Amino acid sequence: MIMAGLRVRIYGDSILRKKAKRVRNIDDELHHFIEQMAETMRASQIGVGLAAPQVGRLVRVAIVREDADDDVPIHCLINPRLVEQEEEQTGSEGCLSFPTLRADVQRPLRVLVEAINPDGEEMHLEAEGFLARVLVHEIDHLNGVLFIDRAERDSLGWLIPDEDTEDGYRIESTSLDQIHRKFDRLHQKTE
Ligand code: ZN
């Protein structure tokens, strides 16, 4: 899938399983990369988070937003660390590296994340609910951990457009086996 210059890596690409390295230098090249990541996420229209390994680069950089709305600010986190987490929530998640897959995942309800911002300053981001979920999902990516690793198995499903439903789609139940087969086929097609 190509969006605004950066190719989003799809499940089955080995880079998604690798651990990203800490950023040591924040320079113009990194700023440019972060801007490209933001453009890629905006172009997806549905993305609320993106981690650098998802666009082929093993550095600890992630961007997040509370809502897939262009008016919602994008936070950029360099070398983010989850320093506190409180309580739990279970809710539906997706990932740009798994087109149309959805699953319920248990995540902390509240988190405190420390990171460096693009100006090189230390930042603290306190988040609750959906943004907390997005932050933990993206930090997982930097460690090669994917949402299907944490998903409740019986909640895995494909999002299928369906005009007869209120939301305009329905979920068709699937399994890890089927997910592997589908993305294997996708890789064979594109290689
Ligand atoms: Zn993801």
Image (cartoon, rainbow, N blue to C red):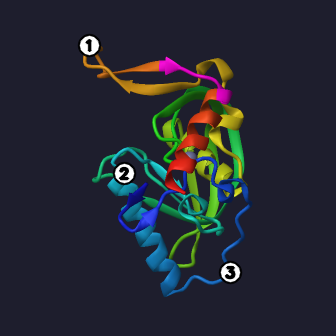
User: What label sits on residue 24 in the rendered view?
Assistant: 3
Residue 111 highlighted magenta (yes or no): no
Number of numbered markers: 3
Q: Considering depth in this image, is 180 or 154 the residue closer to the camera?
A: 180
Residue plotted at (73% across, 59% down)? 18
Q: Residue at x 67, y 59 (%)?
A: 15
Q: Which residues are magenta?
A: 172-177
Image coords of residue 38 (percent x, y) = 41, 63
Mark 3 or 2 closer to N-term? 3
Check if mark 3's residue and mark 2's residue have beta carbons within 8 Å: no
Please state if 164 lies on the left or on the right of 146 as rendered.
Answer: left
User: Which class describes the residues within 10 Å of circle 2: few (<14), some (14-19), or many (20+)?
Assistant: some
Label 1: few (<14), some or many (≥20) within 10 Å?
few
Looking at the rendered image, the quarter that the N terminus falls into is bottom left
User: Is ligand 1 closer than 8 angstroms to the Cβ of mark 2?
Assistant: no
**Secondary element at image label 2:** helix
What is the spatial separation of the Cα atoms under label 1 and label 2, in whole angstroms? 25 Å
Q: CA distance from mark 3 to mark 2?
A: 29 Å
Q: Can residue 24 be spotted in the picture?
A: yes
Q: Nearer the viewer, residue 126 or 142?
A: 142
Kindly report the distance in space between the C-alpha atoms of the residues bearing marks 3 and 1.
52 Å
Amino acid bearing label 2:
Ser
**Tag 3: residue type?**
Arg
Q: Which mark identifies residue 164?
A: 1
Residue to which mark 2 is pinned? 44
Q: Is residue 28 or residue 82 the one in the foreground?
A: 28
In the image, residue 178 above or below residue 16: above
Quadrant into which the C terminus falls:
bottom right
**Looking at numbered disc 1 in the image, what kind of residue is underneath it?**
Asp
